[in-house]
Amino acid sequence: MIKTQKVRLYPNRTMKKVLDELVADKSDWQYQLSARCLQLAVSDLGKAWKNFLNKAQPDWGEPQFKSKKAPRQGFKTDRAKIVNGKLRLDKPRGIKKWYDIRLKGAAFLKGELKVVSIYRENGKYWASLPFEVEIKPKAKTGKQTAVDVNVGHFNYTEGQIKTLPNNLKFLYKRIKHYQRSLARKRKANGKKAARSNNYVETKAKLQRDYRKVANIQHDIVQKFTTELVNNYDEIVIEDLDVKRMQMSHVASKGLQRSLFGCFRQVLAYKCQWYGKELFLADKFYPSTQRCSRCGFVKTGDDKIGLDGNMKHKTKHNEYVCYECGATMDRDENAVMNLLALI
């Protein structure tokens, strides 16, 4: 099994210069630095076009141009090694002294490294180190659970996990402020203006907050999925068509921030790693409209919407069964309906 560990790099001045050249003007360094960087870039381009010709790919689309102005720049190499806890790269031509690069954020890595990605983002250097490890299945618990995903929170049999905590809301507000500020700085007297120092500084702040958001979301998903595979043997989730929902839903921004796709992807590979079973409920399964006690399914004007039901004057988080009279929390009812599929 191949796992990837993201680490922070601390190159010295000489290494920074070489790494900057690797991500800046690639036409100048191709004869001085490792040829594998260029060969792997060409290989990635070939894979991208091959995937483009296969419409069955999940993220099918034409390869996108990678601009040198993008906030994240990097390269790949398959000649990297871990030596005494440091990263060793090929020594370039014309450099007399060459050192191994210090790492931070990685436990002791065992196994052979695969293709390593090294990139610069917000003035910092990072590396993704994929290495092969042996993963042992988790101990069986005999327990089952179901997860009902919602905008802002996930519900399961043991309670609720917030996916939009207050610190994320604060960051989204600040990102909105920086985006508006950048939009004003792009134009002067109705025309496109040159990039000022303030523009560059504001853009760096925006990129920093985007990175903070990504880190918080990554932490939420990783911790919750690890808790699920540690405590349960069988897990049920909904097979949601997130892309279609974002195109047609009034709360598309909330859907985009709610980590539906990321959660499913991470949970799927962890279940595969640790020998757990993941069940996908059909996308048309009425988990929200069905009564978990008597099985009655609401249809037509009786359905629950985002704002509840105007006809019966019920709240958005309240489920009232018109058949047996049961009253319960809407999300808890959905969890019990999903759990009944096992």
Image (cartoon, rainbow, N blue to C red):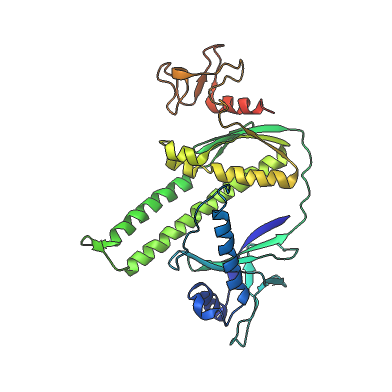
Percent x, y of residue 309:
43, 21
Seen in the image, is 3 located left or right of residue 261? right
Q: How many marks?
A: 0
In this view, the residue farthest toward the front is 53
Percent x, y of residue 318:
50, 23
Percent x, y of residue 237:
62, 35
Point out the image quarter for the C terminus: top right
The one nearer the camera, 32 or 278, is: 32
Location of residue 260 (image quadrant): top right
Location of residue 83 (image quadrant): bottom right
In this view, the residue farthest toward the top is 324
In this view, the residue farthest toward the left is 189
Instruction: Please indicate, yes or no, whether residue 36 appears anywhere in the rendered image.
Output: yes
- Kindly identify the residue that appears in the image at 62 percent across and 48 percent down: 222
Seen in the image, is 223 located left or right of residue 310? right
The one nearer the camera, 188 or 63, is: 63
- Kindly identify the residue that appears in the image at 60 percent across and 42 percent down: 264
Instruction: Please indicate, yes or no, whether residue 125 appears anywhere in the rendered image.
Output: no
**303 lies above or below 33:** above
Point out the image quarter for the N terminus: bottom right
**167 lies above or below 328:** below
The one nearer the camera, 195 or 99, is: 195
- Kindly identify the residue that appears in the image at 66 percent across and 58 percent down: 4
Percent x, y of residue 34:
61, 77
Location of residue 9 (image quadrant): bottom right
